[in-house]
Image: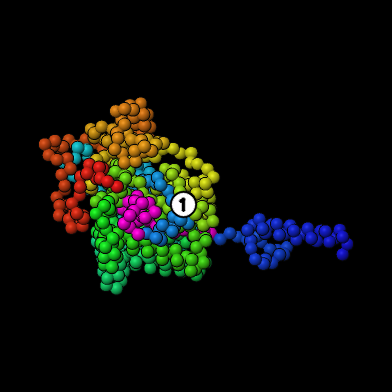
């Protein structure tokens, strides 16, 4: 062979090596004129949604009682968000926001379904939507169109049977109904969409078993999947496995703000679920191609848990009602143990997931969310600097529960505007995470700036507003308990009597 011919022969192999190296291809590859470039494998997605799970309900978020080694490991492997917010202070609106990428105020799904009015309200709530309309495009719809297997395994709570998950892009619906919770964590469950297991089987374990079956089936068939795993845990009623309850009873000390052993046992089982899912992904050798997300739908319910240093919890307009954990593990991208302090919100999950998996036309209807990819890659910031909440309802029977309100967070400032005759409140969350110092009287210009922007946003999204109650009786308590709630499981036998909001606010962390 001539030197010139040899040079071109060697150059040919250099170019081939360069091309395949650039494409990320490893191992022996047959090269020929008709060979096609390798096709990237579609990434799987597991989205775990906890119910009523508070901001400090994980060890990696500061809990001294709850043991969560598996979810903590997810944070060690991925990114933990310190200022993630739920779209609402109660569950159904947040779930709709995750599904659609839209503010609850825009979809008019603004309360837990079906909601509850007090006996003597100052305001009448608007005629809001008590189901997820079939006209809405969901994240599952986009996955389904892209050829993914889709499953919703657990709590749905977005309408009765005509609006169940299988009507919104999910191939499978296991345990999802219109109900806000299960009354039975142990089988028999009495859940119409979940066949009872052996007597005494724990529902968190059962949902995990069903999730693993779904993962195994699709891994075997080499089919990409989207698993939505909205656990019933840790919503009331507090029911845990006896050995775990005893474990935490022995651990609790008087100085712990979190001191409910049954609730701790429920968290432990939830953590084990996440561990089992990740172990299965590893066993099947698909962990490196599976995005895993853990998040909550609203703040922890007080006094079942404590959200300190945040103010009160579920049902409240304060940080304890909406600031919740978010952990994202994007294999090969998220820096292990990374932490993000940028404020983000439920609607962001839809466009983020679509962007990560490469469904280019996905999330075009998710108009209120933004992709968190620049934060996960740590190579950029979000252009958005404001978040909003609108809750034209009452949560009278929750500790620190809200009267109708709207709120805006812009930069470090958060403004709460009550829709009745209560004064507006303003807080600097950077300096005052517990919302103890109301700055409204000291900063009238900031109040006006934020209130004007809040009003403009309500108009932009078509937010429904409450109206005055012509039958309101000022001589009676505004938050008188509806008779059908008196003596209910929600109010008796599940948790100890609630301290006042002021007592919690002043409690030691």
Q: Position of residue 251 (x, y in %)?
A: 28, 60
| Magenta run includes residue 66 | yes
Main secondary structure found in the magenta portion: loop
Q: Position of residue 139 (x, y in %)?
A: 44, 53
Question: Residue at coordinates 69% horizontally, 57% vertically from top-left?
Answer: 19
User: Image height check: is 334 above or below 407?
Assistant: below
User: Image height check: is 458 above or below 143?
Assistant: above
Chosen colour scheme: rainbow
Question: Residue at coordinates 33% horizontally, 57% vertically from top-left?
Answer: 66
User: Image height check: is 208 above or below 356?
Assistant: below
Quadrant hosting residue 445: top left
Q: Nearer the viewer, residue 34 or 50?
A: 50
Q: Position of residue 344 (x, y in %)?
A: 42, 44
Q: Is residue 222 left or right of residue 392?
A: right
Q: Quadrant of the N terminus?
A: bottom right
Question: Residue at coordinates 32% horizontally, 34% vertically from top-left?
Answer: 426
Q: Position of residue 114 (x, y in %)?
A: 26, 51
Q: Is residue 6 left or right of residue 92?
A: right
Quadrant hosting residue 494: bottom left
Given the current orientation, which residue lies at the most extreme left position? 475
Please report the bounds of the magenta region as a residue range.
42-67
Residue designated by label 1: 79
| Magenta run includes residue 351 | no
Is residue 297 visible in the rendered structure shown here? no
Mark 1 element type? strand
């Amino acid at each position: 062979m001539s030197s010139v011919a040899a040079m071109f022969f060697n150059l040919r192999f250099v170019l081939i090596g360069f091309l395949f190296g650039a494409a990320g291809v490893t191992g022996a590859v047959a090269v020929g004129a008709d060979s096609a470039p390798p096709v990237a494998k579609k990434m799987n997605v597991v989205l775990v949604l906890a119910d009523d799970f508070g901001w400090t309900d994980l060890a990696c978020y500061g809990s001294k009682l709850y043991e969560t080694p598996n979810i903590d490991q997810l944070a060690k492997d991925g990114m933990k968000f310190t200022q993630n917010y739920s779209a609402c202070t109660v569950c159904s609106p947040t779930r709709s926001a995750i599904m659609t990428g839209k503010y609850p105020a825009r979809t008019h799904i603004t309360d837990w379904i079906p909601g509850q009015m007090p006996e003597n309200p100052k305001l009448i709530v608007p005629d809001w939507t008590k189901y997820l309309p079939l006209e809405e495009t969901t994240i599952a719809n986009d996955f389904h169109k892209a050829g993914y297997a889709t499953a919703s395994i657990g709590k749905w709570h977005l309408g009765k049977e005509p609006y169940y998950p299988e009507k919104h892009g999910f191939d499978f619906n296991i345990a999802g109904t219109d109900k806000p919770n299960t009354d039975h964590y142990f089988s028999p469950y009495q859940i119409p969409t979940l066949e009872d297991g052996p007597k005494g089987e724990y529902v968190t374990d059962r949902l995990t078993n069903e999730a693993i079956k779904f993962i195994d089936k699709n891994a075997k068939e080499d089919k990409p999947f989207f698993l939505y795993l909205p656990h019933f845990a840790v919503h009331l009623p507090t029911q845990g496995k006896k050995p775990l309850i005893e474990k935490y009873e022995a651990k609790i000390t008087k100085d712990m703000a979190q001191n409910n052993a049954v609730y701790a046992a429920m968290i432990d089982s939830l953590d084990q679920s996440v561990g089992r899912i990740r172990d299965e992904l590893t066993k099947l050798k698909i962990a490196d191609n599976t995005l895993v997300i853990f998040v909550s739908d609203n703040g922890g319910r007080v006094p079942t848990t404590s959200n300190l240093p945040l103010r009160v919890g579920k049902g409240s307009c304060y940080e304890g009602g909406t600031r919740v954990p978010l952990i994202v593990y994007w294999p090969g991208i998220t820096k292990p143990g990374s932490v993000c302090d940028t404020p983000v919100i439920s609607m962001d999950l839809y466009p983020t997931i679509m962007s990560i998996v490469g469904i280019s036309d996905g999330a075009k209807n998710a108009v209120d969310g933004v992709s968190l990819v620049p934060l996960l890659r740590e190579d950029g910031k979000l252009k958005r600097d404001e978040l909003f909440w609108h809750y034209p309802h009452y949560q009278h029977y929750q500790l620190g529960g809200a009267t109708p309100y709207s709120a805006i967070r812009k930069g470090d400032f958060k403004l709460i505007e009550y829709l009745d005759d209560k004064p507006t409140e303003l807080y600097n969350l950077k300096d005052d995470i517990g919302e103890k110092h109301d700055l409204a009287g000291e900063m009238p210009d900031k109040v006006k700036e934020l209130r004007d922007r809040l009003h403009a946003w309500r108009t932009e999204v078509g937010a429904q507003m409450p109206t005055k109650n012509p039958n309101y009786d000022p001589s009676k308590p505004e938050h008188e308990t509806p008779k059908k709630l008196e003596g209910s499981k929600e109010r008796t036998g599940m948790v100890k009597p609630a301290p006042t909001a002021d007592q919690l606010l002043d409690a030691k962390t």
